[in-house]
Amino acid sequence: MNTTYEKELRSLQNWIENANMGLATVGAVTTDTVSANNIYYQISTIADGIVNEYPFYATELNNISKNLFRNSAYGSVALNSAAFGELFVIIHHIIKEPVDMSVWREIHPRIAMTSQSLFSDGYYDSAAEKAVKEVESRLRELFQQLKPGVSVPAKIGDIVGALLTENGAYHFVDLSTVSGRDYRRGIQSLFEGIFAAYRNPSAHANLSCTRREAIEQIVLASQLMYILNK
């Protein structure tokens, strides 16, 4: 996974490991002001990059940066071990659990497998398109399972109709109740809507979308995929 702050994160990680060794062996770490300013820059870049996914960490990193070094003799600066300890934990957590990882735990596994890497690398258009296509693939599989020996329709709208209408082959809700019938009708509309809005247009042109729009499509695709698991 690539992020906008990948270079700074890896560089800061290396510095943290070296500083940690220095604290373990010597008990103190000092550096020059130029190196300290570079560390400040790396921390600031990482904080800006994680502000949406880890707002608490973003704030804490900026606070840590203010207290990380103290003036020492002969123009050098000494590492504040208390602030360094906080930095150590936060950076290691970000590396072990990268940005967006917590969100993807809630996404259907098939959608996550299809779209997560693309999304994390910034290919939002492709990530969203792949998510919707994965829902289509699952519908085609389900049609084959529930209607063995029947040719799978070429048009996805015909598959939705065969599976999700009131007399469709896929039963996912109790139709003996008003709420159940309303739910079925609403879910059918969602399936028809996602293909009309996102799948069909993408078959004729490259659709562009923002990060937010990609998240919305991926979450909707995940919801529909979970419904097909019922």
Image (cartoon, rainbow, N blue to C red):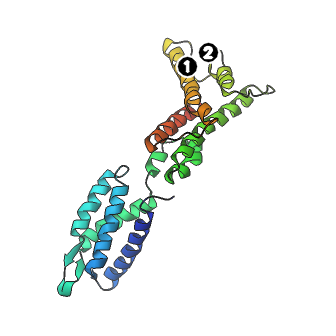
Q: Residue at x 40, y 61 (%)?
A: 93
Q: Position of residue 124 (x, y in %)?
A: 51, 46
Check the image and report above or below for 24 versus 101.
below
Q: Could you say which is closer to the camera, residue 77 or residue 25?
A: 77
Q: Specify the quadrant that holds the C terminus.
A: top right
Dot 1: what SS?
Answer: helix
One can see residue 92 in this view: yes
Give, as a three-letter code, the residue at label 2. Glu
* Residue wearing tag 2: 166
Left or right: 198 in relation to 155: left
Q: Position of residue 85 (x, y in %)?
A: 30, 69
Check the image and report above or below for 86 versus 56.
below
Number of marks in the image? Answer: 2
Q: Residue at x 62, y 31 (%)?
A: 200
Check the image and report above or below for 39 versus 189.
below
One can see residue 169 in this view: no
Q: Position of residue 5 (x, y in %)?
A: 41, 61
Left or right: 19 in relation to 121: left
Q: Residue furthest front?
A: 205
Quarter where residue 78 is shown: bottom left
Left or right: 79 in relation to 182: left
Dot 2: what SS?
Answer: loop
Q: Which mark is residue 184?
A: 1
Left or right: 88 in relation to 171: left
Check the image and report above or below for 147 versus 180.
below
Give, as a three-letter code, the residue at label 1. Arg
Q: Position of residue 60 (x, y in %)?
A: 27, 59
Q: Residue at x 44, y 57 (%)?
A: 97
Quarter where residue 28 is shown: bottom left
Whether the residues at callouts 1 and 2 have beta carbons within 8 Å, the answer is yes
First reached walking from the N terminus: tag 1 or tag 2: 2
